[in-house]
Image: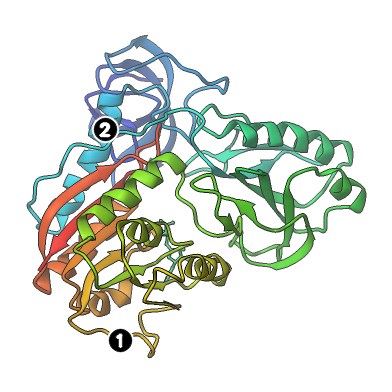
Amino acid sequence: MPTITIKNIDNEGRGQAMFEGHDYRVRGAFPGDEVEVQVERIFKFHNIWASKAKRFVKKGPHHIKRSCSHTRPCPACPLHDANLELEQQVKRDRIINALKEQGINFEVSPVVPHPNRLGYRQKVKLMVGGGPGDLKLGVYVPYSHKFKEAGDCPHVNPAINQAVKELMPIFNNYRVEGLQAIILRAGQDGVAGIFVTTQAIPEVAWEKISLLSAKERIQDQKSNSLLGGVVGKIKGPGKIRSLEDGQLVDPEAFCQTDPAQAQRLYELVADFLWQGEGRYVDAFAGVGGFSKALLKKGACEITAIESNPVCKESLEALELSCQRRLASSSIASSILDPSLRWDDNTLGLVLDPPKKGLMDEAEAYASTGAKRVALVSCDPKSMAQDLKILLKHGYKVQKIIPVDLFGATPAVETVVLLER
Ligand SMILES: C[S@@+](CC[C@H](N)C(=O)[O-])C[C@H]1O[C@@H](n2cnc3c(N)ncnc32)[C@H](O)[C@@H]1O
């Protein structure tokens, strides 16, 4: 096992150094560490030797005290024991590098720090490992089939950790088979669970599950999509009260990982877009976080665009609860919906697409004529590609703000504020 002195940190939060002509990427190591590494996989074409830190000869200046009982390094939280300075550097650099790749040169603001590093994650997806009677919850090590137990995480909402503690003995006592993954979401009124499985969970075990609500998703053995398959047994109300503001939502609807930071994100965007009365569009609306922040500012004409039908009920409820204030509102499932009209009256447009970005809808969104646009993205690469298209359509960047919604990981939300 070679001993290496780490020089840099990469986009995935791995320590990096050249050693004997190879590009080592070391999980769990940070710049300044002198570390004995174990090679996990070699990517010959790129000359990358993916490794993990095995033993520290000397620790550099970036480590903080660990608060986790899992063996390190954890694939789910690569920056778990990195200090705030390094964590923010990784996030900001990811944005700067992605912009550079698209030839965009604009200053990136300092990262808006997360309010809580521990206990903040309101939704988790845990894979199931082990065999019947000895099931474990965890995650897979990147680029491998190695399973790592991680069912009790200090970054996760404590109610979810408690739910895991109660669920696992049930599944193991009844030797449940076929379980592939468990998705848990915390709400103000309890925890909801989605159980992804290839076989129906036996009734005796199902009866013992005491979560607020539970849904079984039965998968075809070959399916890769966790939310595919057919819905089997359901119990409980099917909706939970969101941690953000108590709104009733389907646990399968998208939610930002950190509810407290999500509220800041919504307000930051609404503060920029708000220009007084007129039309605002919340595209990729989810259950309407940005719409609500705009309503609070006084907006009275909002259009939400959202493709996932499970979000629709929450958006409609939002519409009803605001009926007196809203002069007009509407919900569309796509920008291609013929009922959508685009005139010069659109004052503000939120674009908050999934990780893959705006894709083939980018040109259509860039052509709406909205005066101000907030592009919000969890993937720096697709953000920079989408931004390039908005710039081509005459928008000018006012600010690029990284917002930390994912403490202990290299993930970052970028907010690009644009005007024309
Ligand atoms: C990153 S989430 C943002 C949700 C919301 N803005 C929030 O902050 O909670 C992206 C949302 O876009 C929806 N979506 C995905 N593709 C879409 C499309 N082509 N048109 C409209 N909505 C889409 C997803 O269902 C998801 O709710």
Whether the residue carrying mark 1 lies under 8 Å from ligand 1 is answered with no
Considering only vertical position in the picture, is 283 above or below 376?
below
- Residue at numbered disc 1: 341
Whether the residue carrying mark 2 lies under 8 Å from ligand 1 is answered with no
Quadrant of image for the C terminus: bottom left
Residue at 8% over, 50% down: 106
Three-letter code for the amino acid on which mark 1 is drawn: Arg
- Residue at numbered disc 2: 88
Q: Are marks 1 and 2 in contact (CB under 8 Å)?
A: no
Q: Nearer the viewer, residue 245 or 46?
A: 245
Q: Is residue 337 left or right of residue 163?
A: left
Q: Position of residue 272 (x, y in %)?
A: 20, 55
Quadrant of image for the N terminus: top left
Q: Nearer the viewer, residue 410 or 322?
A: 322
Label 1 crowding class (10 Å Cα cut-off): few <14, some 14-19, many 20+?
Answer: few
Label 2 crowding class (10 Å Cα cut-off): few <14, some 14-19, many 20+?
Answer: many
Q: Position of residue 289 (x, y in %)?
A: 42, 57
Considering only vertical position in the picture, is 61 above or below 181?
above
